[in-house]
Image: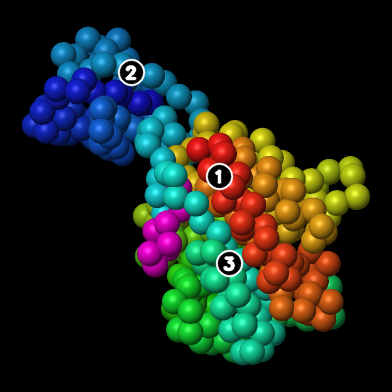
Amino acid sequence: MITVLKPNTTEDQRNQLIGWFEEQGLTVHVSVGEFQTVLGLVGDTSGVDIDMIRLLDIVADVKRISEPYKKANRKFHPEDSVIDVHGAKCGGGNFAVIAGPCSVESEEQIVEVARRVKAAGATMLRGGAFKPRTSPYAFQGMRAEGLELLAIAKKETGLPIVSEIMNENHLDLFEDVDLIQVGARNMQNFELLKALGHIDKPILLKRGLANTLEELLMSAEYIMAGGNENIILCERGIRTFDHYTRNTLDISAVPGLHEMTHLPVIIDPSHSTGKASFVRPAALAATACGADGLMIEVHNDPKKALCDGAQSLTPDQFDEVMTTVRKVREAVL
Ligand code: PEP
Ligand code: MN
C-alpha cells in the first residue's frame, strides 16, 4: 500500500503518521521527492482502513498495490535512482558505458583494452575473472589473479572496475571491484543475493536467461531487502526459439522496467546478440529507447579471445560505436 502526502505536510505530522503505521506492525519506506512524499507500507495491510487514512488532512492519496517488489517499485519511489560507481553515475539521465573483455587474460591485454575504451568514452572497465562457462573444460577465468590485474588497469586509467561474482565466499577478493556483477546464471542464486544485500557496494544484476521482468525485480528486492539499494539492472537477452542470435534482445525491457522500477536499466548488446556485427545496431537501439547505459565486450584481438571472441568488438570498432551512440543520445534527448 502507498500513501501520498500533501505537499504542505510538516515533518512532525509525517512522523506521527509513520509511527501510527509502525504500531500496526508495518514497515514504512519514506521517499521524499521534490514535489511529494510517498510512504510505502510493507507488511500485512489487510487490517488497515484505507478510507480512514484517505480522510486525514495530510493525505493526498492512498492506493493498494499488488506488486510483490516493494523497495524496487517505482510507485514507492517515483524519482529515478542514480547509482554512483566510484564517481561513474548511472540512471536519472546519467549514461554509463561499461566496456572491456569478456575475460581478463593478461596484464598487457586488460591494461591496453582499458586505455582504449577509456579514450573512446567508456565510464567503467569490465573484465571477467570468475567465469560461468557452460562447459567445465572451457577456460574458467584467471580467478583471483584476474581481479588483481583489473585493479592494475584501474590504477593505470582511473576507470572503476566491474567483475562477476559467482560465490559469496569470494567476497573478500572483490575489495577493489567497484561494481559487482551477478551474471544471468546466478540471478536466482538467492543465498548470493542475500549476501550482496549486506555489503556497501553497487551491484550489476543481469536478467536470467528465462526470467520475467518481475522475477528480475524480485531478485533485486532480495539485495535491497538486506539494505543494499544500489543496483543497476541489465537486460542481456533471453532464450527464445530462435537460434540465429545467441539470445533474443528484449528491447522492451527498457521501457517496461522504467515503468516498474526506479532502478537504472542498461543493455548488454554483446551477450544478447552473440555477434560482433550486431552489437552496433543493438547498442544504438538500446540508446534510442532510453537505456541508462550499455555493457559492451571489447577485446584487443577478438580472434584470439579465450571467451566470447565472436561477439567482442575491437577497440577501433568500439570507438566508432561510441561516436554514434553519442549522436543518438543527442538526437533523442
Ligand atoms: C558476462 O557478462 O561475461 C556474462 C557471463 O554475462 P551473462 O551472465 O549475461 O551471460
Ligand atoms: Mn562474455
Q: Quadrant of residue 185?
A: bottom right
Picture disc at residue 329:
1
Q: Magenta stretch: give its range.
A: 84-91
What amino acid is labelled 1 in the image? Arg
Picture disc at residue 60:
none
Percent x, y for residue 235? 65, 49
Residue 277 seen by the camera: yes
Nearest the camera: 151 or 184? Answer: 151
Percent x, y for residue 203? 49, 60
In whole angstroms, how far apart are the C-alphas of marks 3 and 2? 48 Å
Percent x, y for residue 154? 48, 79
Q: Residue at x 53, y 43 (%)?
A: 330
What amino acid is labelled 3 in the image? Ala
What amino acid is labelled 2 in the image? Val
Confirm or reject: label 3 Cβ below 8 Å from ligand 1. no
Residue 237 seen by the camera: no
Q: Quadrant of residue 316?
A: bottom right
In whole angstroms, how far apart are the C-alphas of marks 2 and 1? 37 Å
Q: Residue at x 48, y 73 (%)?
A: 159
**Element at label 1:** helix
Q: Residue at x 26, y 27 (%)?
A: 36
